Image (cartoon, helix red, strand yellow):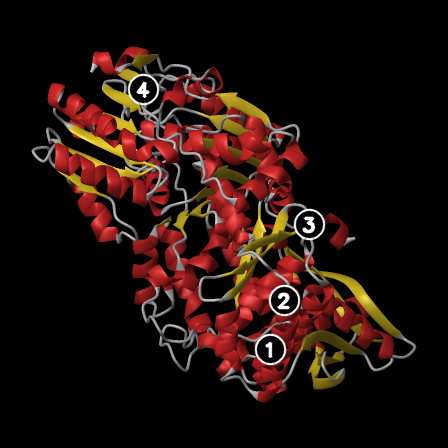
Amino acid sequence: MAAATSPSPAFTVSVKTLCAFGAKAGDLDLRFVPAPSAQEGQAGHRLVQARRGAGYESEIALSSRHEQLHVRGRADGYDTHRRRVEEIKTFRGDFEAIKANHRALHWAQARTYAWMLCERDALEQAEVALVYLDLGTEREVVLEETCTREALREHFDRLCGGFLAWAEQEAAHRAGLDEALDALSFPHGEFRAGQRDLAQAVYRSAVSQRCLLAQAPTGIGKTVATLFPLLKARPGRKLDKIYFLTAKTSGRSIALNALRTMDRERAPLRVLELAAREKVCEYPGRACNGEACPLARGFYDRLPAARSEAARAAWLDREAVRSIALAHEVCPYFLAQELVRWSDVIVGDYNYYFDGSAFLFGLMKEEDWRVALLVDEAHNLLDRARGMYSAQLEAQAVDAVRGKAPPFIKKALGQLQREWLLLQRDQASAYEARDEIPERFTRALQDVVAVMAEHFTARPDDAHGLLQQCFFDLLQFSRLADSFGKHSVFECMVGDDAERMLAIRNLVPAPFLEGRFVDCNSAACFSGTLAPFSFYRDTLGLPEDTATLDVGSPFRSEQLTVRVAMDVSTRFRDRDRSLTALTDIIAGQFAGHPGNYLAFFSSFDYLASASAAFAERHPEIPAWSQSRGMREADRDAFLARFIAGGQGIGFAVLGGAFGEGIDLPGDRLVGAFVASLGLPQYNEPNEIMRERMHALFGDGYEYTYVYPGLQKVVQAAGRVIRTETDAGVLYLLDDRFAREEIRALLPAWWHVQPLFAAQR
């Protein structure tokens, strides 16, 4: 009767999460060991369970309670005759290579299940067994101990006590945050024109659990207009996390700045920035294990104190995480990953959610979180996702590895190379696209991946350098070969030096991304250029019921003078003879209205020709140019030339580092010249894409050339007008901009005027 009248538990946690929180100990150890897949692990569990005799129970659902904490889970196996609880794990290779912190976690899970069975069956003691199954040999390694009921209860209470204190703290944080968010006001008092429409659409998408495609002009404050409504929706929708995903570091900075404007004293958000591993590593070049790196040594022993300080700090940008990590002598990168569980808003790169092995997506699924997704500058996601689901192999690189590889790897690579030669034996042209990958090549690829995985399992210290990189390249290619379909093309290439290359090039990432959109609570993809919506919905895999919003511009047409040069052609065949007219237009505008301008060109080669012609004809005008492979310091120096009241022409590549994501308000930039429609190069790979796009969507030319090209033009033009008080000029230097079908894809607020030679 007492149990029936006791209050319901306030918190529920899985055995896995409980043990991961309180039982991990020792070093961080990321020495690469190929882990069994989920399917292999499940098959291994079934194999062990099938070997057991009568009286053996499998996959037993268990639960227990500690004060206000309800713990539940599913034990792998229980021998009722021996009263033995089994926790089954699968591995390959050397049993001794199983990491100490993993074994500590496995023991904690097994003892927790043992306590639950003692409680269920009123047992005074139980045998606890870790059963490790080697998938290569199907041999079991069993570790056993006998535990009393009291010892198991103490272990359970200790784990639960630590977690319950944290859970109560987190519940108080969430309750206080939700109350504060209910009262949160828009940080800038009044919405700008267009901001309210965007904010309302994002809020509605969160409430209705739908996806949203929103096109909104650059300069209206899209970031704060998307974050604010999700914060307001969080309490009612019981959202666990907001993921703000960006393509570039600058996007992360803008999101963090927007979050700083929120009233964080009243609404103490925990904001976490995820930065790339190579950007935050304190000991570059060292392996991530306790033997090589002092910040990996004892990582899990010091993690609880670092985690507690981080929770109190709340603002966890890159520098704050680093400061806390170094104070507790733990790795900043992996501390940040641990802190995702306890943060409210996570700001990071696209790949953390959309990549094939995406960390944020995996954690969301594992923890069953309700996540609202914000995809910043979403027009960039298409090319980024294509890259995530593409792979390339170079025969020369494989040859180099084969020459130094152990004998059995050398043999497997040799078989792969023979199939590769057979595959390209009759190839007459430098480029050839195919709709299928030969089965014999795929089998040889799978064989070499299996052999290399087995080698790294037995000798994890060999997992570095060229051999490891070759393995990762082959593994990625093999995985994409398994999922190959109409969304991708198999390319066979022969270089100038007879170098052979193979590629799986993704054309439509929709099949890979659609599940990522379906599984979140809501997703808002927003950008200054998302027209037409159907193009992005089709290629990114957004649901059919995705809502759309085209926010009217707050800018007036008189703020931006737009002129189309009707007698200039930047078509490839016309470029040389149009350079004189083009450079004279730029110089003429500068002479009439001196100031800072950007001139955009479709390629570095075209940029070089134009800047050389400009310097020859108009040497008196200051000019500077973007270069290939520009380092961050050089990019900063390029932008530093655009000072208030300055004068000169910056020559840049359309779609490059200066075509979007930079902010030069006022007279830091007074005009732009775009000498291209931005159409991708006409070549065989793009023609293959056009044919595939036509077969899938019916608009092959537009999907391949026109829409991606015009998106870059509008982004570049968006650098000129940043605020309601800005004014400037835009020259579209190609007669094709006057075509009706092209004009329809340009912003409606632009008032385009023709420009003829006689007017210059």
Dot 3 corresponds to which residue? Answer: 485
Dot 2 corresponds to which residue? Answer: 425
Q: Secondary structure at mark 1?
A: helix
Q: Residue at x 41, y 42 (%)?
A: 269
N-terminal of the pair, mark 1 or mark 2, is 1
Residue 87 higher or lower than 166, as above or below: below
Q: Position of residue 51 (x, y in %)?
A: 86, 79
Mark drawn on residue 567: 4
Q: Residue at x 63, y 61 (%)?
A: 479
Q: Position of residue 24 (x, y in %)?
A: 53, 71
- Depth check, mark 3 against mark 2: the one in front is 2
Q: Amino acid at mark 4?
A: Asp
Residue 111 lies in quadrant: bottom right
The residue most toward the right is 54
Distance from Cα at disc 1 to Cα at disc 2: 18 Å
Distance from Cα at disc 3 to Cα at disc 2: 24 Å
Q: Secondary structure at mark 2?
A: loop
Residue 367 higher or lower than 656, as above or below: below
N-terminal of the pair, mark 3 or mark 2, is 2
The reply to whether dot 2 and dot 4 touch (C-beta < 8 Å) is no
Query: Between 551 and 223, which is closer to the camera in this rendering?
Result: 551
Dot 1 corresponds to which residue? Answer: 413
Left or right, 529 with respect to 570, comes to right
